[in-house]
Image (cartoon, rainbow, N blue to C red):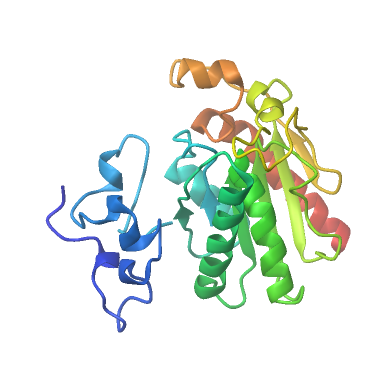
């Protein structure tokens, strides 16, 4: 509990361009978790970090995956791509194509309303949150007619043909982080709604810079997550693949020069 309310709970159009009353950030006041403006990180400070009371474009995976990267790791990625702000967004996490499409539309709306002119748009998604990011990147590219650079980072994402960048999307640079021993990534393509395709998923995207890392199982990780090889967002794993990502970015920039 905190002495002051979450700044997004107050409707103040002079000092705040974002507020729960508009339904922004985790569903705004439509999300019961936001109805107590004095609570911090949904009463789960071990997992979530909210440094200034504003939600900080990162997407979690199916079922509201709690294995999410630390604030320091998010900050490192933010700095890598030259973004001055970061947002961590939540969606239903339901295992269905419709839920992911809805989340992508919400993320698209959030991005176009909050992006900073002159900066690239960086979208990071873990597990099926990466597929949400893929669809959002397509929407953003179409909206800006390919004139705004987009960085898309997918982590441990089940690769399926129904979630791919459009061939017309030339503004998005895609970096895909994967662990070859991740059992969830290849089996996480099922759709409980019955409307999506079933069966095994893939690990790499045909038109992305695919970066492989070795999962780091340690006493600091949840054992189940460590054994699954699906916790690419854990602090230990970010330390392994982030330098590889930064190297890939440098190589791409030198090639473009």
Q: Relative to residue 57, is residue 197 depicted above or below?
A: above
Note whether 23 is above or below 102 in the view shown: below
- Looking at the image, which residue is at 63% across and 46% down? 97
Nearer to us in this view, 186 or 223: 186
Question: Hey, which quadrant is residue 28 in on the image?
Answer: bottom left
Q: Nearer the viewer, residue 97 or 29?
A: 97
Vertical placement of residue 178 versus 28, above or below: above
Q: Residue at x 33, y 75 (%)?
A: 16
Q: Residue furthest left?
A: 3
47 is higher (above) or lower (below) than 171: above
Tally of marks: 0
Horizontal side of residue 40 vs 31, given as left or right = left
**With 64 as the anchor, is 227 left or right in this view?**
right
Measured from the top left, where is residue 15 in percent x and y?
30, 79
The percent position of residue 256, horizontal first and vertical second, equals: 86, 62
Q: Quadrant of the C terminus?
A: bottom right
Direction bottom: furthest residue = 14
Q: Indicate the quadrant where residue 180 lies.
A: top right
Q: Position of residue 64 (x, y in %)?
A: 46, 40
Q: Nearer the viewer, residue 148 or 9?
A: 9
In depth, the one of 215 and 141 nearer the eye is 141
Q: Position of residue 229 (x, y in %)?
A: 61, 22
Residue at position x 30%, y 61% in the image: 29
Q: Which residue is drawn at the image coordinates 78% and 55% (left, top)?
A: 165
């Amino acid at each position: 509990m905190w002495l002051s309310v979450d700044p997004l709970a107050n409707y103040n159009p002079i000092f705040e361009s974002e507020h729960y009353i508009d339904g922004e950030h985790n569903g705004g006041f439509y999300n019961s978790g936001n109805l107590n403006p004095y609570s911090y990180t949904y009463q789960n400070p071990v997992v979530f970090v909210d440094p200034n009371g504003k939600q900080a474009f990162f997407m979690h995976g199916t079922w509201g995956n709690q294995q999410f990267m630390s604030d320091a790791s998010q900050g490192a990625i933010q700095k890598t791509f030259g973004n001055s702000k970061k947002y961590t967004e939540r969606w239903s996490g339901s295992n269905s194509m419709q839920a992911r499409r809805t989340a992508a539309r919400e993320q698209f709306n959030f991005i176009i309303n909050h992006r900073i002119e002159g900066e690239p748009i960086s979208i990071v998604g873990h597990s099926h949150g990466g597929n949400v990011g893929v669809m959002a990147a397509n929407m953003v590219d179409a909206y800006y007619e390919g004139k705004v650079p987009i960085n898309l980072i997918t982590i441990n994402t089940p690769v399926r043909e129904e979630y791919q960048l459009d061939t017309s999307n030339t503004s998005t640079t895609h970096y895909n982080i994967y662990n070859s021993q991740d059992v969830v990534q290849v089996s996480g393509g099922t759709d409980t709604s019955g409307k999506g395709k079933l069966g095994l998923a893939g690990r790499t995207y045909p038109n992305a810079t695919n970066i492989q890392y070795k999962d780091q199982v340690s006493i600091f990780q949840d054992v189940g997550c460590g054994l699954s090889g699906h916790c690419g967002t854990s602090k230990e794993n970010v330390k392994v693949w982030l330098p590889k990502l930064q190297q890939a970015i440098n190589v791409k920039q030198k090639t473009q020069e």
